[in-house]
């Protein structure tokens, strides 16, 4: 079962809750709270990194990932 904020066929409708067999799989309010927590943690980490950099902390260059090319030699 899905609870909508508006008529389900409206382009403005958002799913508020999704419930399957009595278990809540999605809750809009819980999703908003999790997004705010992630945003706060991200800001905290950025501030920490900037304070380390401005305080003379050790820094390093971004590391490039090696590209892996796959090849198939079994085709004729």
Image (cartoon, grey):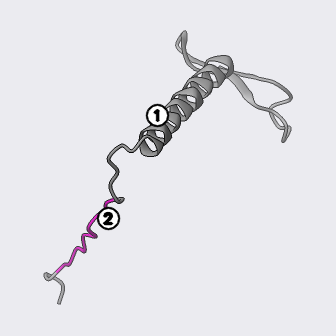
Which residue is at the far bottom? 76
Residue 73 x %, y %: 14, 83
| Total number of numbered discs in the rendering | 2
Residue 42 x %, y %: 52, 34
Looking at the image, which is closer to me, 64 or 34?
64
> Residue at the spot x=24%, y=70% of the render?
68
Q: Which region shows up in magenta?
A: 63-72
Which residue is at the far front? 56
Residue 34 x %, y %: 57, 23
- In the picture of the structure, the residue carrying the numbered disc 1 is 48
Nearer to us of marks 1 and 2 is 1
Element on which disc 1 rests: helix
Residue 32 x %, y %: 66, 24
Residue 61 lies in magenta, yes or no? no
Looking at the image, which is closer to me, 36 or 49?
49
- Crowdedness of circle 2 by 10 Å Cα count: few (<14), some, many (20+)? few
Q: Is residue 27 left or right of residue 20?
A: right
- In the picture of the structure, the residue carrying the numbered disc 2 is 64
């Amino acid at each position: 079962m899905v609870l909508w904020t508006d008529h389900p066929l409206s382009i403005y409708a958002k799913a508020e809750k999704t419930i399957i067999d009595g278990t809540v799989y999605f809750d809009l309010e819980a999703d908003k709270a999790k997004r705010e927590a992630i945003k706060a943690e991200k800001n905290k980490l950025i501030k920490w990194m900037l304070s380390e950099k401005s305080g003379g902390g050790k820094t390093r260059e971004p590391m490039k990932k090696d590209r892996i090319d796959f090849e198939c030699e079994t085709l004729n």
